[in-house]
Amino acid sequence: MNTVSLTADVVPVAEGVHDAPLRRDYLPFRVRIASDPQDVSRAVEIRASAYSRHLPHVGEALRTAEAEDFRSDVLLLIAERKLDRRAIGTLRLEPNFTGPMRVESETTLPPQLQGRRLVETSRLGVENGNDGILVTASLVKAAFEVCRVCAVDYTISVGRRSMAEVFRSMCFDAIAGPVHMSYAPRTPFWIFTAAVVGWEARLRAESPRYSSFMVETEHPDIDVDHNAAIAAFGRG
């Protein structure tokens, strides 16, 4: 069985660059912010397909775009293959700057998160296959780049048991769970958070595998449009 590695082929980065990563690696796909209705449709398709594998009734409901997908203060990330631009992953970023996040309609967040700039990462959908964890890690890396640029304090993520170990490996902390969400009341979920400032230092100290990918490697194919991110989220 093929395995997926998060370790990049080492390509030295030019010396003298401040805070430059140790290496550069190119991915077989690109990650960017969705920019038009066609991108939204492609994100919806891969999202519905991914949810249908584990929560078929939710996947069926997600075959139609949600209202959040079209809000000007919400960002959709999309991963697409270089070969044919087929969408293979998506992640939605929803802030609490202009109103409550979706997760806040399901549970009460702990006091330390009250009054902070938060972004909920939700509706993660990744094509089934050997590259799944690589695509997931790339979407998370792009999300944290958005959050750093926009001075977000914490990210919030909700995941089933199967995602719990992935979040913990990426140095997210569980703040609630198991909890039950209205859209899947019989499935236990956990809520995770990570402080944006200090996250890379935690990865270096606690998760060498993900630190290599998230911190020490430059990925030109993770191409976040900072202007689009700031237009949606501002800078605090």
Image: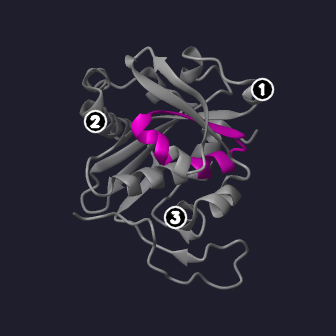
Task: Indicate which disc, 3 or 2, sits on the residue closer to the N terminus.
Answer: 2
x and y percent of residue 206 in the render? 63, 58
Q: Quadrant of the N terminus?
A: bottom left
Amino acid tagged 3: Arg
Tag of residue 209 = 3
**Above/below status of 17 relative to 150:** below
x and y percent of residue 120 in the render? 57, 33
Return the residue at label 2.
Answer: 45
Name the quadrant containing residue 98. top right
Amino acid tagged 2: Glu
Along the horizontal axis of the image, is 173 left or right of 39? right
Q: Quadrant of the C terminus?
A: top right
Along the horizontal axis of the image, is 184 left or right of 137? left
At 38% from the left and 51% from the top, the residue drawn is: 79
Return the residue at label 1.
Answer: 115
Span shown in magenta: 143-166
Would residue 55 be counted in the magenta stretch? Answer: no
Task: Indicate which disc, 1 or 3, sits on the residue closer to the N terminus.
Answer: 1
x and y percent of residue 102 in the render? 54, 21
Could you tell me which secondary element the residue under label 1 belongs to?
loop
Tag of residue 85 = none
**Above/below status of 123 relative to 109:** below
Along the horizontal axis of the image, is 195 left or right of 144? right
Name the quadrant containing residue 124. top left
Task: Describe the colour scheme in one phrase.
Answer: one colour
x and y percent of residue 39 in the render? 36, 41
Which is in the foreground here, disc 3 or disc 2?
3
At 51% from the left and 75% from the top, the residue drawn is: 24
Amino acid tagged 1: Gly
Disc 1 to disc 3, how far (Cα)? 33 Å
